Image: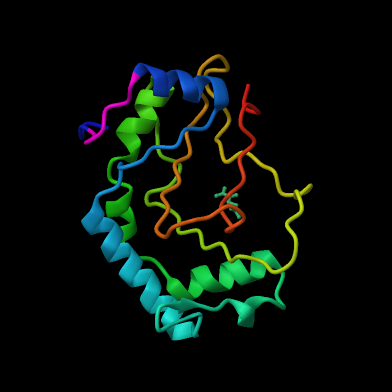
Amino acid sequence: MDMPSRMTLTKDQIEQFGDRGVLRLDGLLDGGAVTAAQEFVRRGVERMGVLAENRWDFSQLDALPAYKANSRLAKTIGYSRSFAAVMADAQPLAEALAGAALVPMLDRPTFLASTPRPGPWALPHNVWHLDLPKAQDKHGVPGVQVFAMLESLGPGGGGTVVLAGSHP
Ligand SMILES: O=C(O)CCC(=O)C(=O)O
């Protein structure tokens, strides 16, 4: 990608990504783009009654299996161009981490909605997967997946689980 990123990665960050396969970057996202995306998402969840007067209530989805609850949320909310604006700086950073040019798998970012689930959390045994095309160069980084959080996320809040160090 030719567009320069607003953020430059340090050597330590690139090393950490190499060691752990995962890297948290604070302050990467454009605030205006995030606000526009949040407003779009909030309008969608308000239509469902999941958000009202600034309070989130997912209970209407509790009876559904997690994958159905998540896809109902994502389908109702839909897609906004603001999602692509949120991810505008992702590709140059992913390429800096990979040390190579990367071809995006999709022509736009995918919106992932994850509902918090009632009850104790258990380590899932059947959903682990790699979202990667088959590596062309078996010795290089086969791909980089970038997640942008649109809302604050606490521990157990439904974020994607990554097993650090599992990539080699
Ligand atoms: O967080 C999730 O529910 C899974 C997300 C996922 O598998 C992915 O984005 O590839």
- Most common secondary structure along the magenta stretch: loop
Res 8 → quadrant: top left
Residue at the spot 37% in from the left edge and 52% down from the top edge: 108
Residue at the spot 56% in from the left edge and 26% down from the top edge: 20
**Front position in the image: 71 or 35:** 35
- The answer to whether any part of residue 101 appears in the image is no
The relative height of residue 21 versus residue 36 in the rendered view (above or below) is above
> What segment is highlighted magenta in the picture?
5-10
How many marks do you count on the picture? 0
Return the x and y of residue 46 as percentages of the image width and height.
42, 82
In the image, taking residue 21 as reference, residue 3 lies left or right, namely left
Residue at the spot 34% in from the left edge and 40% down from the top edge: 90
Res 121 → quadrant: bottom right
Return the x and y of residue 62 as percentages of the image width and height.
68, 76
- Pick the quarter of the image with the C terminus: top right
In the image, taking residue 119 as reference, residue 41 lies left or right, namely left
- The answer to whether any part of residue 67 appears in the image is yes
Return the x and y of residue 142 as percentages of the image width and height.
52, 26
6 part of magenta stretch: yes
Return the x and y of residue 4 as percentages of the image width and height.
20, 32
- Pick the quarter of the image with the N terminus: top left
Q: How is the image coloured?
A: rainbow
**Front position in the image: 122 or 144:** 122
